[in-house]
Amino acid sequence: MTRTTKTKRHIWTVDNGHKRRHRDEIATEEPLEIQLATGGEERTVAITMRTPGNDYELAAGFLYNEGVIADKEAITHMVYCVDGQQQLQ
């Protein structure tokens, strides 16, 4: 999935007491829900905010760091789920 990591928005800045509105690029953040499926059951492990990109690596690292998995061999496959539908990557 290709997602943008920055978004253009109007912002206000104040410099020497003068307020000015202008467009700027800000970091995009989106929620990432990490689900684990094993033995025919699915459950949400975590929901985290992140800058889009490298989602599989983030999810795998999170699961390892939290002690949910012992090594990378514990992961057999990963998919994106958008609106309840799996989308292979």
Image (cartoon, rainbow, N blue to C red):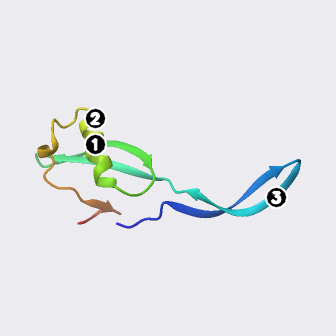
Give coordinates of residue 71: x percent, y percent.
Answer: 15, 39
Q: Position of residue 55 (x, y in %)?
A: 33, 54
Look at mark 1 in the image and give the residue it sits on: 61
Can you say which quadrant of the picture contains the N terminus?
bottom left
Q: Earlier in the sequence, mark 3 or mark 2?
A: 3
Residue shown at 47% from the left, 64% from the top: 4
Write down the residue under mark 3: 20
Query: What's the residue type where badge 1 is placed?
Result: Gly
Residue picked out by circle 2: 65
Above or below, 54 relative to 73 = below
Residue 7 % position (x, y): 57, 63
Helix, strand or loop at disc 3?
strand
**Which residue is found at the position 18% from the left and 37% from the top?**
69
Q: Quadrant of the C terminus?
A: bottom left
Tell me how far mark 3 sits from mark 2, CA to CA: 44 Å
Q: Which mark is residue 77?
A: none
Mark 3 and mark 1 lie on one chain; the one further toward the N terminus is: 3
